[in-house]
Amino acid sequence: MIKPSLLRFLTVLGLITVTATAVAGVGSSKQSVDFHDIHRDGRVAIIGHFGIPIGKTVTVEGALAKPSKVSNDVTLHFTKVNGAAVEEDKKWGSYIQVSNVDALPKDETIVVEGYEFLSWRGSAEANWHLEVEFVITKVISPSNLKPNQWTPQ
């Protein structure tokens, strides 16, 4: 009989091997995943900007992003997720579009609860991509931040 501690070790080792192989692309080609597997049984999770599966409720803290070519009045520069400080993503930064506000307040710390969601952008024939956005479900601060009623586009 295998000891439980050894069994746990072998299971973790197997997961690490599978993960490393998948990340490195060793012996694999593109994988297809049935959309049912993403949201029903949890076998597959799409990880969003916050390092948490898309659709999970999170508390996010940040501020309106500084003006740039890729930001607008609803771009949140987040610095904390669920109370923990986040490291700035070297490639993408720590920014997300908030879908259900007209504008984020300037020069204020913003603390909100909500979730990320996916949407398709572009045409079906060419130049399409997935966009990850954020919907506020509860405003913690500032009190003058008022979300709109949001419906998927």
Image (spheres, helix red, strand yellow):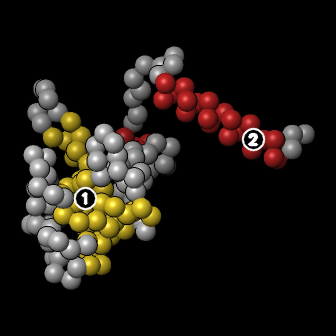
Disc 2 + disc 1, Cβ < 8 Å: no
Task: Check the image and report above or below for 113 versus 120.
Answer: below
Disc 1 element: strand
x and y, in percent, of residue 119 in the image: 22, 46
| Residue shown at the point (42%, 61%) measured from the top left | 85
Residue 94 falls left or right of residue 97: right
Along the viewing direction, whichever of 22 and 63 lies nearer the viewer: 63
| Residue shown at the point (50%, 43%) measured from the top left | 43
Q: Is residue 39 visible?
A: no
Residue 108 falls left or right of residue 8: left
Dot 2 amino acid type: Phe
Say the numbered circle drawn on residue 9. Answer: 2
Task: Check the image and report above or below for 51 versus 108.
Answer: above
Q: CA distance from mark 2 to mark 1?
A: 39 Å
- Of tags 2 and 1, the one toward the viewer is 1
Along the viewing direction, whichever of 105 and 56 lies nearer the viewer: 105
| Residue shown at the point (40%, 34%) measured from the top left | 33
Residue 106 falls left or right of residue 62: left
Quadrant location of the N terminus in the rendered image:
top right
Q: Which residue is mark 1?
A: 77
